[in-house]
Image (cartoon, helix red, strand yellow):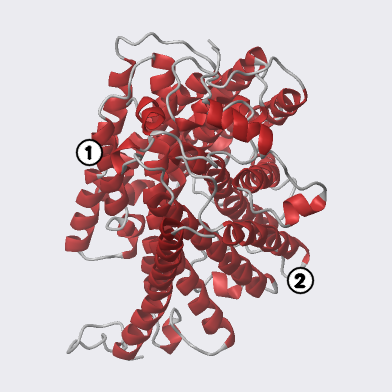
Amino acid sequence: MVSTDEEGRRKRVRRSALILGAVALAFYIGFIVMSVVKAERGSYPAGARPPAAAEP
Amino acid sequence: MAEHAHAPAAVVHEHEEHDHKPHGWKRWVYATNHKDIGTMYLVFSGLMFLIGGSFAMVIRAELFKPGMQLVDPQLFNSMTTMHALFMIFGAVMPAWTGLANWLIPMQIGAPDMALPRLNNMSFWILPFAFTLLFCTLFVPGGAPAGGWTMYAPLFVQTGDAFPMTIFAIHMMGASSILGAINVIVTIMNMRAKGMGLLRMPLFVWTWLITAFLLIAAMPVLAGAVTMLLTDHYFGTTFFAATGGGDPIMFQHIFWFFGHPEVYILILPAFGVVSEIIPTFSRKPLFGYETMVYATASIGFLSFIVWAHHMFVTGIPLAGQLFFMLSTMLIAVPTGVKVFNWTATMYKGSLSFEPPMLFALGFLFMFTIGGFSGLMLALVPADYEYHGTYFVVAHFHYVLVPGAVFAIMGAVYYWLPKWCGNMYDMRLAKWHFWLSAIFVNVLFFPQHFLGLAGMPRRIPDYPVQFTDWNMVSSLGGFAFGLSQFLFPYIIWKCIRSGERATGRVWESAHGLEWELPSPAPYHSWGEPPSEALIARGAAH
């Protein structure tokens, strides 16, 4: 027989573990997505152009 | 120093009635008991110290004199890379997780970690990860040699070891994240009634903050190495300038993980020292709450300083100023800690048992590492020091007489509680003094080499660097040899020794000291009373 207190604690344990796992996953995916977005935009700020290649 | 235990009747009763444990290999493979898993982590960490240390011996042997004598440059670079990976991810981090497993449930009055099966999985991932990493030494192209920072595009050129290393790092990261989740969930949900957050021992506090750092930092490393993998095998060019990518971006991402990682390695050491110094000063810790806030501040600041590792990459002046100043800001909470430890000892009744010796060694030598860190935080100075042996000296002062001394101090502090026997104090003091002398012979000359311009990660060097390299290598060999005392002292303690009392050290405070020694296999089946908690939280 599991007491109500114990059942409540189990729920809290499960919920907080899942939330923390989701935070970790968000950091993992978030940094990859940020890198993809940056790659789409290029290494230069919007409107800026890379320096022209020197003429041979 | 020792006195009789004050174990409550309920605890003793529990010790007698419920000390059943499984036997044979199943006890370890299917382990869910926090003490068993803690022991496995600590043994694993010891093994990794041995392997990582042997890589360091190869490095110091090669650098003993100028010219190439023992290994080729590729293997030398593999040794520096593998030494770092084994020591950081295999030795120091698992040692802290082992201590967390052993101590956190006992210190907060919980019967075990909140997620015991996850705990088992967190540990058992590690032997597979490090076996895979170790095997890279035997594949075509050799072990990874691009440094533990794995900078692109250099690291992408690694041979057959590349995917093995990436997979191993993913496994280490997964293990750390699962361990961190378990620690946070345990501390937030399993504390005994009456154990408020500001009653928790400092070791628990520092581990709680460390676990949050792990949750935020380790996935970033995993993301970085995943992108390295796709750059290598799937035609992406995240970090390849030839395809429009940006190699500097890898450094930003890596150090967003890498700098908090430094604090992941050192924050639990702050916790350990905050436990040891009051016990052997026979005084409560000075400024408990400021210690908690200082630890939290360091944790936060660790996420906004990463680019101080990248001053020479040409980041804008505003960026250099921001990262220089934010880095220097860390000296404030760190200074608060050093002040509080010193103030705790002030007018205390000090005694110098091995844990206190290691804590004092930590205090002096970690501060040296902290000061050289401040020097490196200065942009103009960093332009000179970057990539030299000065940096090597700096981070080894932080990690060896810093983190590693704290780990050894922690083992000497809690070992009698774990195995029920006192250890050989004389030998342990020998271990401290040999370690303290030779760690300085090993690393202090590296400051001079760095200031004279010797670059790091080179197997050969001009003759003017010979003398200090010889001194450093001799210190390294002696330091390495003296470490064999440590497992011998532990082994001897487990097999024999004077019986330890419950409290072990007369001025020790905390719930773990209310249990008998050795701590029962299942502790706090009956939660501790509020009176017991109040007595334990006498800080």
Q: Position of residue B112 (x, y in %)?
A: 55, 48
Is the residue under label 2 in contact with that under label 1 (CB below 8 Å)? no
Quadrant of the image occupied by residue B192: top left
The correct choice, above or below, for B396 with respect to B33 in the image is above
- Residue identified by numbered label 1: B332
Residue shown at 51%/72% (left/top)?
B225
The mark nearer the N terminus, 1 or 2, is 2
- The chain under label 2 reads B
Q: Position of residue B207 (x, y in %)?
A: 42, 46
Residue shown at 43%/20% (left/top)?
B279
The quadrant the C terminus of chain B occupies is: top left
- The chain under label 1 reads B
Nearest-to-viewer mark from 1 and 2: 1
- Residue identified by numbered label 2: B140
What's the amino acid at mark 2? Pro
The correct choice, above or below, for B487 with respect to B33 in the image is above
Q: Position of residue B438 (x, y in %)?
A: 58, 25
Quadrant of the image occupied by residue B330: top left
